[in-house]
Image (spheres, helix red, strand yellow):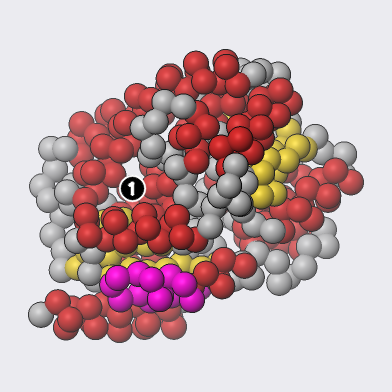
Amino acid sequence: MKKVGFTTTIPVEIIFAANLIPVDLNNIFITDNNPHTFIDFAEQEGLPRNTCNWIKGIYTSVMQNSVDKVISVTGGDCSNNHALTEIFRAEGIDVTTFNYPYENKSRYVSLKSEMSLLAAELGTDLDTVQKFQENLQGVRSKLKRLDELTVENKVSGFENHLWLVSSTDFNGDYLSFEDNLIAFLDEAQRREEIKNNLRIGFVGVPPIFTDLYEFLENKGVHIAFNEVQRQFSIISEKRDIVEKYLDYTYPYDISCRIEDINREIKKRKLDGIIHYVQSFCYRQLQDLIIKREIEVPVITIEGNEPGGVDARTKIRLESFIEMLEERKK
């Protein structure tokens, strides 16, 4: 079976329905034993140093023949994907584009058209995809239970992050993924509750730091909310495949995300929010709105290189934690 890579979360049901293997190119990069080699390769090939390292990781994943075809999300994700698509085409890579509609008016019609075009490109149709998506309802409901166990202090923030990020492509095999998830949930439900001083949430793109969760947990913090990772798991229970991906907040305007974040802050009784932004990413501009609209204290941290949290960021996080502890008293 051929492997189809994609640059960010797409309706993965389309790939499965076409009897192809989905591959999240971000996961190939960040789970490698030495992700810095991906960055070095991309820079040696000519990508500018001041380009987001996620883009460099995706570029290298494709150029090193990890997949047979690429779906580049050019609407609703990184604007650099436009240029990346052009580079792939110039290199003879089999690439097609997918766009989440930005404007709210006629969004259903626009998204349905995009999904139909992608399905046809991959050799299937939307009716087949609609029927297939029922196969993923079970595993998605289990991911929802995983998130509930995180709120109940039975699953750590890092475990939550890892499972939800992996659900973008289900590691290429949703049946095996579901079996492993069932075993994990069975074990997690029998645990004692995690003891913590503070409940904090992450918003923004998944952090490139490899030890951020460990650092915070050692400080007595429970990460009870991973905003974008949770959205990656496609939490909507709607049966219509188009409506399901309309409920996915990440690719649309920031107001959709703000509403979701504030609702979860209340539900999860969060003391504060960490907003992670990636260097050279346009989404950094949204920090202004997030700090204005979020209903608890927010700290913004920035990352660029895969690896451990730098000393300056650790100091800032420690100060934020101390402030929240004082505020809670």
**252 or 49: nearer the eye?**
252
| Rendering quarter of residue 19 | top right
Query: Is residue 297 one of those drawn in magenta?
Result: yes
Please report the bounds of the magenta region as a residue range: 288-304
Quarter of the image for residue 213 reads bottom left
The residue tagged 1 is: 160
Q: Can residue 174 be seen in this snapshot? A: no
Answer whether residue 154 is magenta in the image.
Answer: no
In-image side of 8 versus 69 (left or right): left
The residue drawn where x is 40% and y is 76% is: 292
Residue at (24, 49) in percent of width and height: 150
Q: Is residue 298 left or right of residue 90?
A: left
Q: Give how far across and how far down residue 166 sits, in percent.
A: 46, 40
Q: Nearer the viewer, residue 121 or 154?
A: 121
Picture coordinates of residue 139 (x, y %)?
36, 28
Number of labels in the image equals 1
Which image quadrant: the N terminus? Answer: top right
Residue 311 falls left or right of residue 71: left
